[in-house]
Image: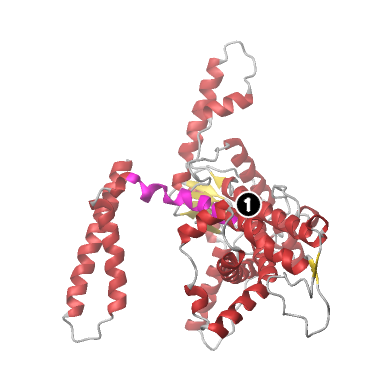
């Protein structure tokens, strides 16, 4: 099966290369404008794909395993930033916070690295409270980012299991009961380890770097049943009844998101409201938000809190580092611009390999580290701030990323078809006001600042079933 998949990808790459090359020859002989940069990118992309299989690089199985290594790369990157602080950047904090300088304006900014004994007096490092404070904050933020990131990677988003998976589970239960000839209850933990299969990290179903998350079928069934109870449904997952589903479709969908059950044609199962099939990991996810490449997992009902807190602490860590390093970075750029021009500021940076081994050996100068870390933190901080802001908008609206996109498409379609009419915003039965929606997503406020996983409560999502009785 895996060989057939590899052959299919190889044929697709070769076909794409031939089509791209034919289109390139036609474009270069055409009288229309020829965009060299655009065609260079197209040829490079299709050429790399062909060369990957032609030169035997496919034996490395990068096209299969690359997704499972992305979260590992992210963790190494976070750990490298924290290590760079304790290895080199800590000296910048020490110079700024652990020296006592006079207050007159004439003496401010005359210190080069905080070593001017005539204007500043040094404080003993062991008694520098600010240095200890910054050390504790950096270590705390780094730990919390990695903790919730790993939790979101390995925590199941809440999956409606396919029919074949439930049949396998029933067969394993029957075989376990047949082995128990003494009519004694089997050890549940032992039977669970022997019978329950694993989700594969290389299939983007959680985990990373060859570490697969364990599929706990009983846990998944509990999540689905709990979700059904919340939505006021009595059915369980896996029932293949098209009649009930067709009756639901006949009713008017006056709300968005819909509070009706749906049927998945790929998994052949009836599924609760707000459940969607992910094309990447090929499974139906409860309250599906999106599939995150960095997490190598879907973001859904059961791990959305861990995902939000990962973004929250990532923003805190980036902007905390920006606040600590912006002043030395601007001073260094100002000095370089006065001497030789601002562009020399970045041309003086060493190679990445030199930086990496210097960080490990603790020999890298803190000024060089600051030139690398500050722009990186600033860029990531801006991106994550926008990303987190959008998710906060989804949270207070009681919508997922997919549902918000569908709602915008509905609005755009109605505006294009009926430009003179005002858009009708359908009520959201899962919303209880922005404050309650925030609590449903993040859980108790007192637990946000602790490394604790919180299971989704029965108030998340909250369906206003009383408002739907008359519909």
Left or right placement of residue 297 versus residue 13 in this view: right
Q: Position of residue 446 (x, y in %)?
A: 80, 54
Categorize mark 1 by other alpha carbons within 10 Å: few (<14), some (14-19), many (20+).
some
Numbered range of the magenta stretch: 60-78
Place residue 430 in its image quadrant: bottom right
Q: Nearer the viewer, residue 427 or 96?
A: 96
Which residue is the site of mark 1? Answer: 146
Place residue 183 in its image quadrant: top right
Kindly identify the residue that appears in the image at 60 percent across and 66 percent down.
Answer: 256
Q: Is residue 326 above or below residue 314?
A: below
Q: Is residue 161 visible?
A: yes
- Residue 424 on the magenta span: no
Kindly identify the residue that appears in the image at 28 percent across and 74 percent down.
Answer: 39
Q: Main secondary structure of the magenta part?
A: helix
Q: Position of residue 392 (x, y in %)?
A: 66, 67
Q: What secondary structure is marked by label 1?
A: helix
Q: Position of residue 293 (x, y in %)?
A: 49, 56
Q: Nearer the viewer, residue 392 or 234?
A: 392
Q: Is residue 188 above or below residue 213?
A: above
């Amino acid at each position: 099966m895996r060989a057939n998949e590899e052959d299919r990808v190889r044929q697709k790459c070769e076909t794409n290369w031939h089509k791209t090359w034919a289109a390139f020859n036609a474009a270069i002989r055409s009288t229309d404008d020829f965009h060299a940069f655009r065609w260079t990118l197209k040829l490079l992309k299709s050429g790399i794909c062909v060369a990957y299989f032609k030169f035997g690089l496919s034996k490395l199985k990068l096209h299969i395993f690359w997704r499972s290594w992305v979260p590992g790369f992210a963790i190494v990157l976070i750990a490298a930033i924290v290590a760079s602080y304790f290895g080199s950047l800590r000296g910048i904090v020490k110079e700024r916070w652990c020296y006592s300088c006079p207050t007159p304006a004439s003496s401010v900014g005359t210190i080069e690295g905080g070593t001017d004994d005539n204007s500043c007096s040094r404080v003993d490092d062991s008694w520098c409270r600010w240095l200890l404070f910054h050390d504790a904050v950096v270590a705390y933020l780094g730990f919390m980012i990695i903790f919730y990131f790993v939790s979101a990677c390995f925590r199941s988003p809440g999956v409606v299991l396919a029919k074949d998976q439930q049949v396998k589970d029933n067969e394993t239960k029957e075989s376990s009961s047949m082995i128990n000839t003494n009519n004694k209850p089997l050890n549940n933990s032992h039977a669970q380890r022997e019978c329950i299969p694993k989700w594969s990290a290389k299939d983007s179903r959680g985990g990373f770097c060859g570490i697969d998350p364990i599929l706990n079928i009983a846990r998944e069934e509990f999540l689905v049943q709990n979700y059904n109870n919340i939505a006021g449904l009595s059915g369980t997952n896996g029932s293949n009844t098209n009649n009930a589903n067709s009756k639901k479709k006949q009713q008017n969908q006056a709300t968005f998101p819909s509070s009706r059950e749906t049927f998945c044609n790929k998994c052949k199962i009836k599924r609760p409201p707000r459940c969607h099939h992910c094309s990447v990991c090929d499974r139906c996810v409860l309250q599906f938000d999106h599939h995150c490449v960095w997490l190598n997992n879907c973001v859904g009902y059961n791990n959305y809190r861990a995902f939000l807190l990962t973004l929250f602490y990532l923003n805190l860590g980036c902007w905390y580092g920006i606040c600590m390093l912006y002043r030395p970075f601007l001073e260094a750029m100002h000095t370089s611009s006065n001497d030789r021009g601002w562009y020399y500021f970045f041309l003086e940076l060493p190679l990445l390999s030199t930086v990496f081994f210097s960080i490990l050996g603790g020999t890298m100068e803190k000024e060089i580290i600051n030139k690398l870390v500050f722009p990186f933190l600033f860029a990531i901080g801006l991106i994550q701030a926008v990303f987190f802001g959008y998710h906060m908008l989804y949270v207070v609206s009681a919508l997922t990323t997919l549902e918000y996109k569908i709602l915008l498409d509905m609005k755009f379609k109605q505006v294009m078809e009926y430009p003179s009419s005002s858009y009708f915003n359908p009520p959201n039965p899962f919303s209880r006001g922005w404050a309650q929606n925030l609590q449903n997503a993040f859980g108790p406020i007192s637990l946000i600042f602790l490394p604790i996983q919180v299971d989704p409560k029965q108030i998340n999502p909250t369906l206003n079933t009383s408002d739907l009785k008359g519909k």
